[in-house]
Amino acid sequence: MTEFPTRPVAQLVGSNGPIHALTYSSTPSTYILTGSSDRSIRLYNPSSTTQSPTGPPTGRLIQTYTGAHSYEVLSLSVSSQNDRFASSGGDRTVFLWDVSTATTLRRFGSHSTAHSHTGGRVNAVLFSGHDDSLLLSGGHDTTVRIWDTKSSSAKPVQVLSDAKDAITCLATPQNGEPEIISGSVDGKVRSYDVRMGRCVTDVLGAPVTSLSLSKDGKTLLVGGLDNKIRLFDRRNGTSLKTYEHPGWRNTELRVQSCLGAKERYVVAGDELTTSEVGIGNNQEEGKIWAWDLLTGKLVATVPVPWGGDANNKKVTIGRDGKEKARKNVVSCIAWKEGGFGNQFCVGGTSGVVNVYGEL
Amino acid sequence: MSYKRSRAAYEADVTSQQSPYVFFGTPLPPLDPDVRDDGSYVPIWKQEVRDERGRKRLHGAFTGGFSAGYFNTVGSKEGWTPSTFVSSRTNRRKNDVKPAQQRPEDFMDEEDLADAEEDRRIQTKAAFAGLGSTENDASRATGLMGLFRATGETMGEKLLKKMGWKEGQGIGPKVRRKARLELRSDANGPGETYLFAPENVPMITFVRKTDHKGLGYGGQARLAPIGSSTKNNGAGHSDDEDAENMGDFGKPRFTLPTDRKKKKDNKPRGGIGIGVLNDTGSDDEDPYEIGPKISYNRVIGGDKKKKTTTTINPAVKAKPTFMPSKKSSLGKIALGVRKCHDGRLPLDGFVFGKEPDALTSAINSEGKYPPPQVPPGWVSSKKSKSPTGGSSGFVSTADLAKGSMLDPKSRAAILGEKQLPGKSVFDFLSAAARERLVAATGRADLPQAKGEVPAEYALSEEERMNELLSRVPKLDKETAVAAISRGVSTGAPYADDEKKRSRYIAFLEYQAGFKPTPGPQPSKMNSEDWLRELTEFYNCARIFKPMTGFMASRFTTSSTTKPGSGAEAGQKDVLSKPPLKPQDPAEEAAKLGMFGPMTRSVTDFYPTRLLCKRFNVRPPEHVQPDEDHPTKPAHGSSSRFDVYPDQPAFRPEILTMSGGTGDARETSSGEGSGKSTPAPVMVIDPNRNEALEGKRAGEDVFKAIFGDSDEDDD
């Protein structure tokens, strides 16, 4: 991938509401899982496409996982063996799914509310531990709960309740280091080193909405609600680079950012709250912003079409009861093979996932 | 065959027939089928007393018995519990709706109510009671004319009251005078003067002369009852009797002191048999009032106690009393000079106009004797001195200014002022000031602000720089030096922005005194931004200094004021601001973008064993092993009395934990940790328990325990 791709090569349709979670399957990252606000999880193969008369070809919908979540699906995580995946949602539950049979294997925190997430949504879920034996989940109740996928105990292995506000994102190194990184609305990134028994707290100031670890686990990309994405040196907590642009604003919504193209770029969605003229005020069209990792310069802004067919409504009922045009907020982003593949996909309020790069 | 019926048979017959004594018509049905009402005798013990509702109760005291409460008790059906009592201990005056208004009826029983009902009589209301009576004739006499008079407050009165007028007061500006107290002695003293409302002015009334008597002659009073003499008098009305005068609507009334005199005469005189000196008891009355109006001095040595004529309340009409002024008023009175209607004498040199005589005015009004006509072509011989001023009259400056055709520019030209360059105010306004104007006026179409500075006020570049730098907070030299050294050694702030970092270093060097200026102003920034950045640097340097300095900053010295700017400092002290809430230094540092050691904090984290196991790592050192310690020896027959081989490692902790007592502390502190390391390592054979499998005790021990007791028993 020499040039940053500017046109979607495929679209994944079928969701009946905004997409909240996107993830590629584990290596070789053939499939894409989407978590939607219509309470279902969909498994797509972006490579086998059928031509669409209007837009880019649509990827094949393989499976729809429904019936478990009673609220929107907010986060997804696929195990390294690609046999199971975990999902969390607005109904304070975490489900462990079997990919092939489309059934839930476990429901964490269901047996006793004393052990489940007490308040509201579970924002993030993540496999961790040796052999994916642990499942981390963090949510509005300010705790990170660590569940054991191997035993059938209803109790979490441990509850990390240091955060003073909701947990928004979780990360764990891909190289198997025993670490748990959590980002919270209280503006702090906490790294729990299990081996050393240390918790390193880095203050960002603004609420943390996105965490992305580099492959070597030495740098961490942190997105916060202060219009800036920062690359942190995990060793001493210094900010190596700050990625920002006057046209890119992020103060209200969770907009994910990630490292991409073999960690050449920092890619993020757009919450479209800017009213700047000239940058593009087309609310139907979301944008992807890409910065160069090393120089911190803006490399590209890629338009994201609304997508879908005519049934995909572009209007919503506002608080005043009138219909208004929906913004295409690009809230979630995933890069193939943890940032090292040749493809990435974005999703947002349009409910259509746009796949960029090579098929 | 007749036989005498038995009594019982007769009574049965009677009851069946209802009433045996009815011979004509239909008998009324009995009141109560069980009780015979034939008037036959019922013995007392058989009589039952029932109240009007048929209840078997004793009746009231006045009707032959008494009845009280619940079956002649003070209780109720539930016992003696006042049903209305609600404890207010918890809800004091909270939700009491309104204490129920208690009426006398609430305390009355049926009997009392019945009595009260009986006492009520139907009466006609007073308003209707007098229909046909002559009681209110006097008030009704006004009749039709009453319709045309406004009753109650007139609109004028309302307006006056709104303006602060009170009834009885006069109208006009307040008068400064002494307070007229009742005691005359006060008036003589060096009294202070107060502002009083002016005195009320009696209404001028004119009397239309309708009789043929001589002018000023009132005529003889008619014989009339004393009470009504004033009514018939016609001229003797005072304002108090307005109500009675309502009838003579439009009739001119004329009040003069001479007339008022008559009122005095209306005092009831003593009747027959009442002597002159028959005192009624009141001191006010002068028994010698009758007779010639000579005031006798009946008190030797001292002023005669005058009748109180002045009242504090001016609403009460002051009686017309003659208060002779020392000088000339006597003469004036002699000349027939009256007072003006406001009670003052006319100005010197003025005389009162004659009262327009009713007759002459009537004649004049008819035009019988017109005034002489001015001959045509007559011109006054007098001429005003100023020919123009007389005609145009007085013109105010504002009117003159209005008439002027000059505008500011032409005026400036006349005055010889130099013309300003053709610029508007907006050329000199800053953009921020224009924004404020736009916000205040709500008009966005104001001209662009250019922020120019007139040439004579323009600062040189150097001055501007100095002015700017004076607004930058001053950093201590040592702090600046410390911040530089710190910035060099470890991760400096603004590591991600090379230019900013160099500016920061330059700023520090300037503050430390190494350089005269903190470098040139960056071309991209305007001075406001640059100032902001310098302030940020200042904050940054204060945080980003060695730990000792940082700790020192936790303690603030008492504020010192510069001796030179004492007034200014005082000004600032008055506007004392509340101390800012101490912020987390990490948050502050994060806000300044100084990520690194400042924003990082490390705490201990205690992963559970299972977590460590799932991560496939050993638990950290500080994680306390719990009961099932992994290094526990795995021998099967471990008993409770086993001593763990790793127990010596815990010894120091046990010692410090039991440090509450004095000697224990001594052992731990005195011998120190050096003692604990060479603690005797017990080598334990796990297969052998010393305590259990020790040497068998001596024979005498057993003997002492078991043997002796037997002997004692013997």
Image: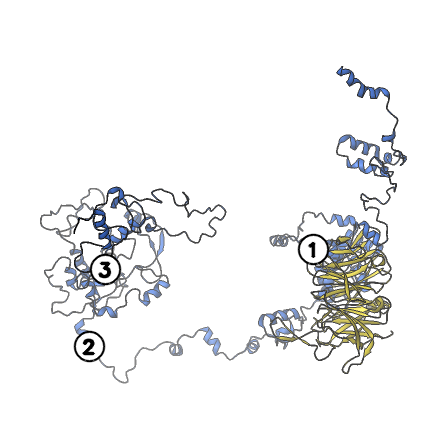
Chain colours: A yellow, B blue
Question: Label 2 sits on what residue type?
Answer: Asn
The answer to whether A98 appears left or right of B290 in the picture is right
Question: Label 3 sits on what residue type?
Answer: Ala
Q: Position of residue B308 (x, y in %)?
A: 24, 50
Q: Secondary structure at mark 1?
A: loop
Residue drawn at the location 86% of the way across and 34% of the way down: B675
Looking at the rendered image, the disc whose residue lies closer to the viewer, 2 or 1, is 1
Mark 1 closeness class: few <14, some 14–19, many ≥20 residues within 10 Å: few
Q: Marks 3 and 1, how far apart in space?
A: 82 Å
Contact between marks 2 and 3 (CB within 8 A): the answer is no
Residue B364, label in figure: 2
**Residue B433 seen in the current view:** yes
**Residue B254 seen in the current view:** no
Q: Position of residue B481 (x, y in %)?
A: 80, 53
The residue that label 3 is drawn on is B126
- Where residue A334 sits, quadrant-wise, is bottom right
Mark 3 closeness class: few <14, some 14–19, many ≥20 residues within 10 Å: few
- Please tell me which residue lies in front, B41 or B496: B41
Q: Secondary structure at mark 3?
A: helix
- Please tell me which residue lies in front, A309 or A303: A309
Contact between marks 2 and 1 (CB within 8 A): the answer is no
Question: Label 1 sits on what residue type?
Answer: Thr
Q: Chain of mark 3?
A: B
The residue that label 1 is drawn on is A113
Q: Chain of mark 2?
A: B
